[in-house]
Amino acid sequence: EPEVTQTPSHQVTQMGQEVILRCVPISNHLYFYWYRQILGQKVEFLVSFYNNEISEKSEIFDDQFSVERPDGSNFTLKIRSTKLEDSAMYFCASTYGANQETQYFGPGTRLLVL
Amino acid sequence: GENVEQHPSTLSVQEGDSAVIKCTYSDSASNYFPWYKQELGKRPQLIIDIRSNVGEKKDQRIAVTLNKTAKHFSLHITETQPEDSAVYFCAASGFQKLVFGTGTRLLVSP
Protein backbone atom coordinates (compact mmCIF):
# COMPACT_ATOMS: atom_id res chain seq x y z
CA GLU A 1 0.00 0.00 0.00
CA PRO A 2 1.45 3.42 -0.94
CA GLU A 3 2.46 5.68 1.93
CA VAL A 4 3.46 9.28 2.49
CA THR A 5 7.15 9.48 3.37
CA GLN A 6 9.07 12.25 5.13
CA THR A 7 12.72 13.12 5.65
CA PRO A 8 14.52 13.63 7.87
CA SER A 9 12.90 11.79 10.77
CA HIS A 10 14.68 14.08 13.24
CA GLN A 11 16.27 17.49 12.82
CA VAL A 12 18.13 19.52 15.42
CA THR A 13 18.93 23.11 14.56
CA GLN A 14 20.06 26.34 16.17
CA MET A 15 17.64 29.21 16.62
CA GLY A 16 17.72 31.50 13.58
CA GLN A 17 18.78 28.78 11.16
CA GLU A 18 16.77 27.73 8.12
CA VAL A 19 15.37 24.23 7.89
CA ILE A 20 13.72 22.38 5.03
CA LEU A 21 11.44 19.45 5.75
CA ARG A 22 10.73 17.09 2.89
CA CYS A 23 7.72 14.99 2.03
CA VAL A 24 6.89 12.61 -0.79
CA PRO A 25 3.10 12.40 -1.06
CA ILE A 26 1.25 9.40 -2.46
CA SER A 27 1.89 9.45 -6.19
CA ASN A 28 -1.58 10.15 -7.65
CA HIS A 29 -2.62 12.58 -4.93
CA LEU A 30 -3.27 16.20 -5.84
CA TYR A 31 -3.75 17.97 -2.48
CA PHE A 32 -0.94 18.31 0.02
CA TYR A 33 -0.91 19.47 3.61
CA TRP A 34 1.43 20.30 6.45
CA TYR A 35 0.40 19.98 10.07
CA ARG A 36 2.38 20.37 13.26
CA GLN A 37 2.04 18.87 16.70
CA ILE A 38 3.76 20.40 19.69
CA LEU A 39 4.67 17.70 22.23
CA GLY A 40 1.61 16.56 24.13
CA GLN A 41 -0.79 18.78 22.21
CA LYS A 42 -3.23 18.40 19.35
CA VAL A 43 -2.42 18.32 15.66
CA GLU A 44 -2.69 21.79 14.08
CA PHE A 45 -3.21 22.66 10.44
CA LEU A 46 -0.51 24.80 8.82
CA VAL A 47 -1.14 24.93 5.08
CA SER A 48 -2.82 23.20 2.15
CA PHE A 49 -1.43 23.19 -1.39
CA TYR A 50 -3.01 22.40 -4.74
CA ASN A 51 -2.02 23.02 -8.34
CA ASN A 52 1.25 24.64 -7.28
CA GLU A 53 -0.46 27.19 -5.08
CA ILE A 54 -1.32 27.58 -1.42
CA SER A 55 -5.07 27.06 -1.14
CA GLU A 56 -5.39 27.78 2.59
CA LYS A 57 -3.07 28.64 5.46
CA SER A 58 -3.49 29.08 9.19
CA GLU A 59 -2.39 31.92 11.44
CA ILE A 60 0.63 29.84 12.41
CA PHE A 61 1.87 29.87 8.81
CA ASP A 62 3.47 33.33 8.86
CA ASP A 63 6.13 34.87 6.62
CA GLN A 64 8.79 32.59 8.11
CA PHE A 65 7.15 29.57 6.49
CA SER A 66 6.98 28.63 2.83
CA VAL A 67 6.03 25.56 0.85
CA GLU A 68 7.12 24.33 -2.52
CA ARG A 69 6.67 21.43 -4.89
CA PRO A 70 10.08 21.59 -6.58
CA ASP A 71 9.48 18.56 -8.79
CA GLY A 72 6.81 15.99 -9.53
CA SER A 73 7.28 14.06 -6.31
CA ASN A 74 8.56 16.21 -3.45
CA PHE A 75 6.66 18.69 -1.28
CA THR A 76 8.75 20.81 1.07
CA LEU A 77 8.18 23.03 4.09
CA LYS A 78 10.81 25.69 4.74
CA ILE A 79 11.18 27.61 7.95
CA ARG A 80 13.42 30.59 7.22
CA SER A 81 14.59 31.60 10.67
CA THR A 82 13.66 29.04 13.28
CA LYS A 83 12.44 30.00 16.74
CA LEU A 84 12.41 27.91 19.90
CA GLU A 85 8.63 27.63 19.63
CA ASP A 86 8.93 25.97 16.22
CA SER A 87 10.05 22.81 18.02
CA ALA A 88 7.38 20.26 17.18
CA MET A 89 6.56 17.21 15.12
CA TYR A 90 5.71 18.19 11.54
CA PHE A 91 3.42 15.90 9.57
CA CYS A 92 2.79 15.95 5.86
CA ALA A 93 -0.45 14.55 4.45
CA SER A 94 -1.98 14.12 1.03
CA THR A 95 -5.35 13.38 -0.59
CA TYR A 96 -6.62 12.77 -4.09
CA GLY A 97 -9.60 15.12 -3.81
CA ALA A 98 -10.42 18.11 -1.66
CA ASN A 99 -13.69 17.24 0.04
CA GLN A 100 -14.49 14.41 2.42
CA GLU A 101 -11.25 12.69 1.57
CA THR A 102 -9.17 10.54 3.87
CA GLN A 103 -5.92 12.28 4.71
CA TYR A 104 -2.94 9.96 4.88
CA PHE A 105 -0.21 11.19 7.20
CA GLY A 106 3.50 10.71 6.83
CA PRO A 107 5.63 9.50 9.77
CA GLY A 108 6.60 13.02 10.72
CA THR A 109 9.79 15.03 11.24
CA ARG A 110 10.66 15.86 14.82
CA LEU A 111 12.21 19.34 14.80
CA LEU A 112 14.14 20.55 17.82
CA VAL A 113 15.27 24.17 17.86
CA LEU A 114 17.96 24.98 20.42
CA GLY B 1 -13.56 29.10 11.82
CA GLU B 2 -14.17 25.55 12.96
CA ASN B 3 -13.58 24.61 16.58
CA VAL B 4 -13.61 21.01 17.79
CA GLU B 5 -13.92 20.07 21.45
CA GLN B 6 -13.19 16.57 22.70
CA HIS B 7 -13.98 14.82 25.98
CA PRO B 8 -12.73 13.23 28.11
CA SER B 9 -9.05 14.11 28.03
CA THR B 10 -8.17 10.80 29.70
CA LEU B 11 -10.13 7.57 29.94
CA SER B 12 -9.14 4.47 31.89
CA VAL B 13 -11.04 1.23 31.35
CA GLN B 14 -10.60 -2.44 32.13
CA GLU B 15 -9.95 -4.86 29.30
CA GLY B 16 -13.25 -5.95 27.81
CA ASP B 17 -15.10 -2.78 28.79
CA SER B 18 -16.45 -0.28 26.29
CA ALA B 19 -14.98 3.19 25.76
CA VAL B 20 -16.80 6.24 24.45
CA ILE B 21 -15.15 9.47 23.33
CA LYS B 22 -17.23 12.50 22.38
CA CYS B 23 -16.58 15.49 20.16
CA THR B 24 -18.52 18.60 19.30
CA TYR B 25 -17.90 20.94 16.39
CA SER B 26 -18.99 24.48 15.66
CA ASP B 27 -19.15 24.89 11.87
CA SER B 28 -22.33 23.50 10.34
CA ALA B 29 -20.54 23.37 6.96
CA SER B 30 -18.27 20.57 8.21
CA ASN B 31 -19.19 17.34 6.46
CA TYR B 32 -16.36 14.88 7.14
CA PHE B 33 -15.41 13.50 10.55
CA PRO B 34 -12.43 11.16 10.88
CA TRP B 35 -11.00 9.57 14.00
CA TYR B 36 -7.29 8.99 14.34
CA LYS B 37 -5.32 6.81 16.74
CA GLN B 38 -1.84 7.98 17.65
CA GLU B 39 0.71 5.90 19.50
CA LEU B 40 3.62 7.59 21.19
CA GLY B 41 5.98 9.17 18.67
CA LYS B 42 4.04 7.83 15.70
CA ARG B 43 1.88 9.32 12.97
CA PRO B 44 -1.89 9.67 13.39
CA GLN B 45 -3.53 6.58 11.88
CA LEU B 46 -7.09 6.75 10.57
CA ILE B 47 -9.28 4.20 12.32
CA ILE B 48 -12.73 5.18 11.08
CA ASP B 49 -14.46 8.12 9.46
CA ILE B 50 -18.00 9.24 8.79
CA ARG B 51 -19.48 11.55 6.22
CA SER B 52 -22.40 13.85 6.85
CA ASN B 53 -24.94 11.84 4.89
CA VAL B 54 -24.60 8.95 7.33
CA GLY B 55 -25.65 8.77 11.00
CA GLU B 56 -23.66 5.75 12.08
CA LYS B 57 -20.82 3.59 10.82
CA LYS B 58 -19.34 0.43 12.29
CA ASP B 59 -16.15 -1.48 11.67
CA GLN B 60 -15.75 -4.56 13.88
CA ARG B 61 -15.23 -3.27 17.45
CA ILE B 62 -15.27 0.40 16.46
CA ALA B 63 -18.31 2.53 15.68
CA VAL B 64 -18.89 6.22 15.11
CA THR B 65 -22.16 8.11 15.43
CA LEU B 66 -22.92 11.56 14.05
CA ASN B 67 -25.67 13.95 15.08
CA LYS B 68 -25.57 16.85 12.64
CA THR B 69 -28.37 18.73 14.34
CA ALA B 70 -26.55 18.80 17.65
CA LYS B 71 -23.13 19.04 15.96
CA HIS B 72 -21.62 16.17 17.84
CA PHE B 73 -20.05 12.84 16.99
CA SER B 74 -18.78 9.99 19.11
CA LEU B 75 -16.36 7.08 18.92
CA HIS B 76 -17.36 3.80 20.53
CA ILE B 77 -14.88 1.01 21.12
CA THR B 78 -16.29 -2.27 22.41
CA GLU B 79 -14.41 -5.17 24.02
CA THR B 80 -11.35 -3.01 24.58
CA GLN B 81 -7.91 -4.62 24.50
CA PRO B 82 -4.59 -3.40 25.92
CA GLU B 83 -3.40 -2.65 22.37
CA ASP B 84 -6.21 -0.09 22.09
CA SER B 85 -4.23 2.07 24.53
CA ALA B 86 -3.22 5.25 22.67
CA VAL B 87 -4.29 8.86 22.15
CA TYR B 88 -7.40 9.23 20.01
CA PHE B 89 -8.14 12.42 18.07
CA CYS B 90 -11.37 13.40 16.44
CA ALA B 91 -11.35 15.89 13.58
CA ALA B 92 -13.80 17.82 11.44
CA SER B 93 -13.47 19.10 7.91
CA GLY B 94 -15.58 21.26 5.62
CA PHE B 95 -13.11 21.57 2.80
CA GLN B 96 -9.53 20.34 2.69
CA LYS B 97 -8.08 21.05 6.13
CA LEU B 98 -8.76 18.95 9.19
CA VAL B 99 -9.43 20.66 12.49
CA PHE B 100 -8.49 18.34 15.33
CA GLY B 101 -9.82 17.92 18.83
CA THR B 102 -7.50 18.02 21.82
CA GLY B 103 -7.19 14.25 22.10
CA THR B 104 -8.22 11.53 24.54
CA ARG B 105 -5.62 9.35 26.19
CA LEU B 106 -7.18 5.89 26.47
CA LEU B 107 -5.60 3.42 28.87
CA VAL B 108 -6.85 -0.16 28.81
CA SER B 109 -5.72 -2.18 31.81
CA PRO B 110 -5.45 -5.97 31.57
Image (tube, rainbow, N blue to C red):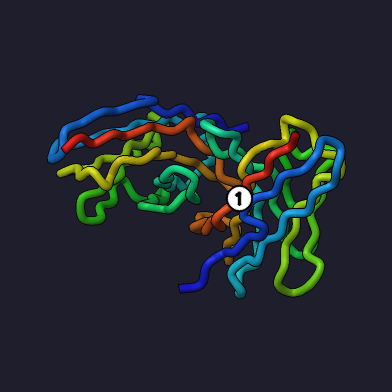
Q: Could you say where residue B79 lies in the image, as x and y percent from the top left?
A: 15, 44
Q: Residue at x 40, y 46 (%)?
A: B37
Q: Residue at x 61, y 69 (%)?
A: A29
Examine the rendered structure and indicate whether residue A107 appears above or below residue A62: below
| Left or right position of B8 against B33 | left
Quadrant holding the C terminus of chain B: top left
| Left or right position of B106 against A90 | left
- Count residues near mark 1 (Cα–Cα under 10 Å), then give few for <14, some for 14-19, many for 20+: many
Q: Which residue type does callout 1 highlight?
A: Phe
Q: Residue at x 39, y 51 (%)?
A: B49
Q: Residue at x 39, y 25 (%)?
A: B9
Q: How many marks?
A: 1
Camera-nearest residue between A39 and B58: A39
Residue that badge 1 annotates: A91
| Left or right position of B107 against B45 | left
Camera-nearest residue between B43 and A99: B43
